[in-house]
Amino acid sequence: MAMWDRIKDQAKGLQQAQGARGASAGGHGRPGSGSSGGSKAQLVSALKSQLTSLKTELKSGAYRDASMAMCALVAAADGQVDPAERQHVESLILNNDVLQNFPSEQLRQRFNKHVDQMGFNFQQGKAEALQEIAKAAKKPTEARAVVQTGFVVAGADGYIAPAEEQVLREACSVLNLSPQEFGL
């Protein structure tokens, strides 16, 4: 838990430093990047760095499968995935440093399987994705990394939607993690 508190503190410090720089530079922030959005963006950035530092530890099939289920769940959080969103998330997956531990075709296949299931029957597909995610609970480092991966995908557009936060909370629940650890 202390590690996650340090990450949050680092994110808060980065946000404050950027806020001070933005104010002295005439305030050229992104539209809609209020304190809540900014802190989430900083948290996503800190989680992405932490995830990258664990790359050598994250090579198991359980992490791969749970991460792809998590990515699909985030992509379909609002109950649907349009083709452009699917392609965008697939691109994020294939360009993620940590996920490059795995063959891209394996990642694509697992991600698309979950998205297709949720597209056919959202509730059943969501339940199956959460079951896949739950398999990573046996290893706390992998469990946290699955949630971090979900955060990175959810925050890639600079905003984490309420539906995305909800599925991240649900993933924390099946992984026996506290959502507060991730600022949820």
Image: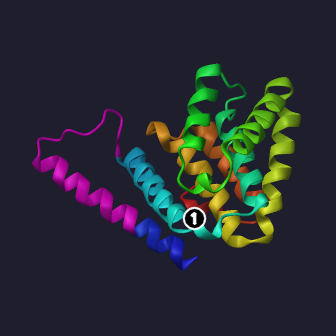
Characterize the local packing of mark 1: few (<14), some (14-19) or many (20 or more) Cα atoms within 10 angstroms: some
The percent position of residue 57, horizontal first and vertical second, equals 64, 70
Residue ID at (64%, 28%):
86
Quarter of the view holding residue 85: top right
Which residue position holds label 1? 55
> Which quadrant: the N terminus?
bottom right
The percent position of residue 37, horizontal first and vertical second, equals 41, 44
Vertical comparison of 87 with 129: above or below: above
Vertical comparison of 98 with 90: above or below: below
Q: Main secondary structure of the magenta part?
A: helix
Residue ID at (52%, 76%):
3
Quarter of the view holding residue 32: top left
Secondary structure under badge 1?
helix
Locate residue 26 relative to residue 156 in the image: left or right: left
Nearer to the camera, 49 or 14:
49
Nearer to the camera, 160 or 105:
105
The percent position of residue 168, horizontal first and vertical second, equals 66, 49
Q: Is residue 13 magenta?
A: yes
Residue ID at (59%, 63%):
180
Q: Which residues are magenta?
A: 10-34
> Which quadrant: the C terminus?
bottom right
